[in-house]
Image (cartoon, grey):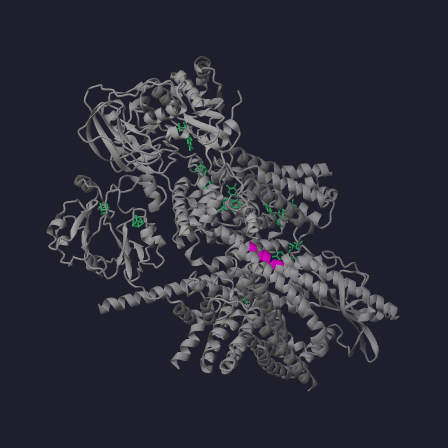
Amino acid sequence: MAVKSFRGGAHPPERKDRTSGLPIEYLRGAKSVVIPVNQHFGAPLQPLVKVGDQVKRGQKIADADGRMTVPVHASVAGVVKKIEPRTQSNNVDGPCIVVEADGSDGVDFLAPLDGFACTKDEALARIREAGIVGMGGAGFPAHVKLAPSKPIALVIANGAECEPYLTIDERVMIERPGDLVEGVALTMKIVGAPKGVIAVEENKAHAVAGLEKAVAEKGRGFDIEVQLLKTKYPQGGEKMLISAVTGKEVPSGGLPMDVGCVVQNIGTLVAMVEAFREGKPLIERGLTISGAACASPKNVVVPIGTLVSDLVAEGKVEVTEAELGRVIFGGPMMGTAVPHYAIPVQKNTSGVLLVSKKEAEHYVEHSCIRCGRCMRACSCRLSPALLNQALVAGDWEDAEKIGLLDCVECGTCSYVCPARIQLVQRFRVGKQLLRAKKQKEAQNACK
Amino acid sequence: MKRLWNIFKAGIIYENPLLMLMIGLCSALAVTTNVQNGVGMGLAMTFVMLFSEVIISIFRKVIPNSARMPIFIIVIAAFTTIIDLVMKAYFPELSKSMGVFIPLIVVNCIIMGRVEAFASKEKVLDCVADSLGMGLGYTWVLVGIAAFRELLGNGTVAGLQVMPAGFEPILFFILPPGGFLVFALFISLNIWLKGRMQKAAAKSAAKAEEVAA
Amino acid sequence: MMTILITLGFSALLAFVLGALLGFFREKFKVERDPLVDAVRGALPGANCGGCGYPGCDGYAEAVAARRAGPNLCSAGGSKTAEAVAALVGVAANAEDLVSVLLCSGTKEKALDKGAYVGIPTCRGAKLSTGSTKACAWGCQGFGDCVAVCKFDALAMGDDGLPKVDYAKCTGCGMCAEECPQKLFAIVPKSRKGSVVLCSNRNVVKANVMKACKAGCIKCEACVKICPEACIAMVNGIPVTDYAKCTSCGKCVEKCPTKCYALLETDVMGKKKVAVNA
Amino acid sequence: MMKDIVKLGLILAAFAAAACVGLAFVNQATEGQIAINQEKQLNESLKGLFPEAEKFNDITKELTLADPAVKLEAAYLVERGGAPLGIAAKASGNSYGGVTTVLVGLGLDRRIAGVRVLDTKDTPGLGANAAVPTYFVDKTSKTTFPGQFTGKALSDPFVVKEDIAAITASTITSKAITKIIKASADAAGARLEAIAMAPPAPADAAGGK
Amino acid sequence: MTKIFIIALLINNVVLMRFLALCSYVGMTSDVGQSVGMGFAVTFVTVLATAVTWPLQTFVLAPLGLGFLQILVFILVIASLVQLVEFYLKKNVPGLYAAMGIYLPLITTNCAILAVTFENISNGYNFIESIVYSVGVSLGYLLAMVLLAGVRDRIKNSPIPAFLKGTPILFAATSLIAIAFMGFSGLVK
Amino acid sequence: MPANNLLLSSSPHAFAPATTRKIMLAVIIALLPATGYGIYLYGLPALILVIATVAASVASELLFRAAIKAPRSVGDLSAIVTGLLLALILPPSTPIWMAVLGAVFSIVVAKEFFGGLGANPFNPALIGRAFLLMSFPAAITTWHKPLQGIVDAATTATPLNLVKQGASLADVAAQVGAGDVGGLYWQLFLGNRSGSIGESSILLVSIGGLFLLGLGVIQWIVPVAVLGTTALFSWALGMDPLFSLLSGGVVFGAFFMATDYSTSPLTPLGKAIYGAGIGLLIALIRKLGGFPEGVTYAILVMNMLSPFLDKLRVKKYGYVAPKKPAKTAAPAKEAAK
Ligand SMILES: Cc1cc2nc3c(=O)[nH]c(=O)nc-3n(C[C@H](O)[C@H](O)[C@H](O)COP(=O)(O)O)c2cc1C
Ligand SMILES: Cc1cc2nc3c(=O)[nH]c(=O)nc-3n(C[C@H](O)[C@H](O)[C@H](O)COP(=O)(O)O)c2cc1C
Ligand SMILES: Cc1cc2nc3c(=O)[nH]c(=O)nc-3n(C[C@H](O)[C@H](O)[C@H](O)COP(=O)(O)O)c2cc1C
Ligand SMILES: Cc1cc2nc3c(=O)[nH]c(=O)nc-3n(C[C@H](O)[C@H](O)[C@H](O)CO)c2cc1C
Ligand code: SF4
Ligand code: SF4
Ligand code: SF4
Ligand code: SF4
Ligand code: FES
């Protein structure tokens, strides 16, 4: 099989060996959960419950009207204790519903539905009602992504898992290949794509045999192929993945559907299958808990809203406090560093890293030596060094021309920079300001 | 009298045409390979500036606004020609070594600038003070730069051997790149000095205020 | 003598022709333009030295007239020219002078850090990647983005980690208010008198505020209760003074347990608190 | 409008006329001196080459240079009491930094009577040392670069670093000036042949070098 | 002819080796576009000025014995020329005026132009040579302007020591550019 | 629960091992063979020269930054690289005080004036050399025969000087005692010839260069472009291409100086043009210029073009050509008519 890739990128140490051989542990007995009301990319939700309400597992507890919304469900059965702002994994205080388990196992799932038999609208409605968002990071509502306005030729299952440490997608591919293949088939059915590809990085080549077997057995005759990709960060970035698999590039400012593609994370696909087969909303997810300050690295499935601190308190995760230097929600390349770990797992939390002081290098920005490493590594072929220079100078025109808005914030440039320049952070700030500036200009133009 | 003195003083430091206003640079760099040239150029400039300012100040009321520029040019050009001819006649060597830069006084931004900004508005005596101040300000910088360049680049000052015999001249300083660098350092020195002076002034002012309070 | 005659004839002829040509062309190709440009142009020395960074005096005059450039860029003309130009473009006196007031007292000592932030030293950058470097989500990040945008040199970063407004220089242009990612500046009339709460923490849980910042408003509502004019009300988690009623009696200031209440005219804008950052 | 134009023209004309007439007077006052300067300069240079000379006849048109890279500026037949002493040629050519102008004198003995570097645009301290009277290629005998040519015969090789000492680190200048000298001396020699000036008997040339 | 051109353009570059036209060199190089505009405007006017002053000197001043009026006449003629061109462009070719006209007033006092017209005469160039020389000099000016603009662009965000910020660093940069230009010396012998 | 002491950083939270310091260290290591050989060829004076320039570079950077109260930066080792490179491109007989002056000029004027590491538009070591060449042309163009000590040994002409003075390759071979032209090539390759301290052995210089290429410290484009175009244009101008590569400082310059990060363009196309420009200028200056060797000036001249070449960027991912507004405007105009 030809191994495919994209131009640019870097290869940070994988550090996956600590968890890649460990089967997923199902830790479903949370005593209480803190469920953030807003976990998706889109309009904010309103809680549907009050303090003191009794809720069942799978019961819808927050929702809103509007296309870009998906509801949130209770992940344990119990009583609503509080609805108050809590720190979320993006470091922002947002409204959360605190549910305390009462030992009952009341379940309130949807009715099972045959995704291959129902209409497209029924299928999309189900996906929304089940609260499914992209679990690969951005948390984009899945029912929106699966109703593209352009014809789709290819569905790609994103099994790249290019972030160091993370192994949960790998475990799913090994342990549940059948569900994954069914998810790909289901997606192909919904978007009407003639072809599906499960894209897997080379370092997970051992999962390929199982996947190919599952395709033969559970593929329902859909044209699904398994494709090996070079192990390289950010192979899993949607745009990079598409150019690696198809050779086509998503046009600047465009979407995958502009080149006839839909990309779905492994976890998302499995969650979809469960939502149809069992009527189970997205109330739990798998993630990798790892890092050198974690004495018991593992792959787990936990209810959404589980506080990492609770897992620690219950002894399910061991932390070497003295060594702890940084807590990261997500992978080390794209994740968010948080000030403590009393923070709930969300729908888009693919990992929690308890990084040791030694790993948490404390760096200072030096001056750019113009080595060009960032340019060679940039997955979007931008010129981070020049972009940085333009931003420091406040030259917005130049920054936009170099491609500020095209940056996918993968962080490869910052990773490779020998001068430790905080390129991506500056780009994020720059994008925020540039967008604000453009909005203002548009407003002025309207006037 | 105090006022004239102040006008005169301004050109020497605070509004020094070369260091502060940064105009009329060309001749300042081109002729400063030795001190004689610097003196010659400075005096020639002063001469043209003095007479141009005086004449224009005298006629300032009769010069119509619309013909201002051409008339200024005529006046300046006339005095430039005079100094050119006089130097050719009586200082042939100096005239030769400064070449085209004597005629170019006519477009020297300093003169045009002062004539427009000052002479066309102010009284004759003020103009004398201003042109002498500006001219002297210009000359001392020229001589300063020239002395520095000549000393390091040739081991001499005004043609007299200053450095010990063993000194190997650093030609860089009398070559064009050296001219640019020395000038850069001169300006920065002046900016630094100005900063110091301002700080000192601010400090004393603050002190005065404190005392008053 | 002959030469002198030739000179006379030649020069007179040349100058006449040139002068006439110029006059003719000027009339023929006359282009209307903003009289202010001409006025400014008139005040400039006309040396066309380019020292201002604009293409000649005309270019600069246009820029000044269009308020794209300040009045003090002409180095050839010196201070006199600058004054003249400034007088020409002098903006009509402001209806009301405005100033900027910082609504946070969370100094380095008083407001707790949430963690050890590393990254670009700007408030916006810090906020974007940490939510807030302070345990208080509303507090000042202390990197001085506001200081950097102030065109009037009216802001300086204090040693205590908070920006200081120099009310002698602040023009109330609002650049800092716009730039601050925490939206901590209020632009108020310079003449305003009365009390103000120098805190923006909207967390309604008292314990949370106390944990985060020793200078924060802990929602005890002592100010609301003590005000004899009943002019303070809690709005969105923070006390707000009604300036129509406030008499600057200072009772709320006295009563506030964390001392985050202050009087605008003395504590904020008065000489008393303006720490000159030496 | 017409009136304005005429008025503008007249004012300008008045100023210009006044200025120019003034200049004309200054010019008249200095003209003589400048001419004297120039002549004196030329005379001094020429006299430097031929101290006994009394008269210089311009024969610029009569000399032709073989080397196209060297340009003849002027040439004079030097006379004393009606009898020719030699030819002085002013010629220029490109050197390191631009055009260099040299005055070369050739005696009847077909030896170089002297050389003056009149103008050089070469680097001060390097090539320009050719025109510096205190720069010596031979410190012991205090011979300047142009000085070393005095007394050289036309038949000499004129090769830098062989029979001609170079200015330190300025081979280009040295070669360029040598080329100008050689070319103009050759032309002068040819002219002397043409006007049938036989070289004097060898005994007379003893004073050469 | 090539020699005259190369020498004027590189070896004796007006700005870098001869220190002419420095005021606009410092003032008009804050961005590359500006420096190109100024450079072409100067080229245009220099050639025009040469085309007018050379015949004026050769056919009028010299025969009439009015050589001493050279300075006055040349500067007047150039100044008027610039004015005329400016008036003309402003009214009739506003597009070009927007691009170039704004630089014209600066040119009146650009000493390089006047120097070229003087040197055409003092170097004894014929008409064609004078034109070539003027093009060479002004393109040399353009080149120096563009190079400095490039360097300025490159260093605009650099942590330059405070005492050098502003004009000093421009001259220091010019010094280094001039050092690099020494490499062209001796290229034409 | 730990409080207030965890690191809060923006992603990414991991970094590649390369740091500025390690990169500079690699360059120093790559230069060691050539440096050692230079010391072997010219003895103690060469060693003293190297030590002097390095010390002067480091000291001037330290002192200057202390004087302007900038953060100390000698830890990044770049000053050592500059000092070392400067020594290696000077004649072995350069008086120490001159070399020190050159090093100070390199660091202070060419580097620190512009903001220090990475901000300098011109190659500091080459500016230092050009400054010395300009200031003391005699001293910096005096060469010595290798392996004879330089205290009282005779000066000599370098092979390039000989060619400049019109000698043929066979003459040169005879002069340097290499027998035939083939022997001359071999001798030049191994490095038994006069010249600057570090440039002599093409073999050792190339080993250093390949070491840097292998480590990924430098990219292949610039050296290949420089060497290729030097050979090409030398041939086109009627010079021997192989001799052109083997003589003078071309190989040294191509690997160590044209590749200097701060002064060379960032993009592949920019690098290619930059390298080609250097090659062309080297050939031109050698053939027509006032100097026998033109590497210094060729690189410095191209340094000036770097800011422009930086604009030749690679097309970004998903680049779409901007729509020409003219097309939409034209019909509108017609409609208006
Ligand atoms: C730099 C970068 C790296 C990413 N890496 C992965 C990855 O390794 N695995 C993954 O599933 N999604 C990854 N994503 C998210 C994908 O781009 C994409 O959003 C996701 O695969 C879409 O599936 P979802 O909507 O089901 O999450 C990455 C995104 C970016 C910007
Ligand atoms: C800045 C500089 C200026 C120079 N000026 C001259 C010069 O005016 N005349 C000259 O012949 N050589 C000059 N040279 C030296 C030549 O470039 C070249 O090194 C020399 O002609 C070779 O001669 P050599 O064999 O005596 O070393 C200069 C060199 C430099 C670096
Ligand atoms: C990178 C580098 C650049 C150099 N640049 C020059 C230069 O521009 N001019 C010069 O005369 N010598 C330069 N040199 C020194 C020359 O190599 C010297 O002229 C050389 O010894 C002559 O070459 P050859 O020994 O092959 O004849 C440079 C040396 C190096 C290593
Ligand atoms: C590959 C490479 C080449 C370098 N070449 C030079 C050089 O030619 N001259 C120099 O002064 N420094 C050189 N340095 C060191 C450093 O980059 C130099 O000091 C910077 O130019 C200073 O900003 C080099 C460094 C590297 C990594
Ligand atoms: S973060 Fe942006 S600029 Fe940096 S490598 Fe990724 S896409 Fe490129
Ligand atoms: S990787 Fe860092 S040091 Fe290198 S060019 Fe990019 S920003 Fe500069
Ligand atoms: S007031 Fe705002 S902008 Fe200013 S330092 Fe504080 S957070 Fe930053
Ligand atoms: S609590 Fe109030 S005073 Fe303290 S940091 Fe927050 S906003 Fe500032
Ligand atoms: S441009 Fe030459 S003096 Fe101003």
Q: Is residue E14 visible?
A: no
- Given the current orientation, which residue lies at the most extreme top position? A217
Residues rendered magenta in the picture: E139-146
**Rendering coords of residue D6 (x, y %):** 60, 79
**Quadrant where the C terminus of chain B is found in the figure:** bottom left
Residue E55, above or below F208: below
* Quarter location, residue D41: bottom right
User: Considering depth in this image, is D68 or A31 the residue closer to the camera?
Assistant: A31
Whether F100 is among the magenta residues is no
Residue F133, above or below A206: below
Please identify the dominant SS of the magenta region: helix
Quarter, ligand 2: bottom right
Q: In the image, what residue occupies the spot 11% across and 51% down?
A: C226
* Quarter location, residue F253: top right
**Quadrant where the N terminus of chain B is found in the figure:** bottom left
Residue D59, above or below F101: below
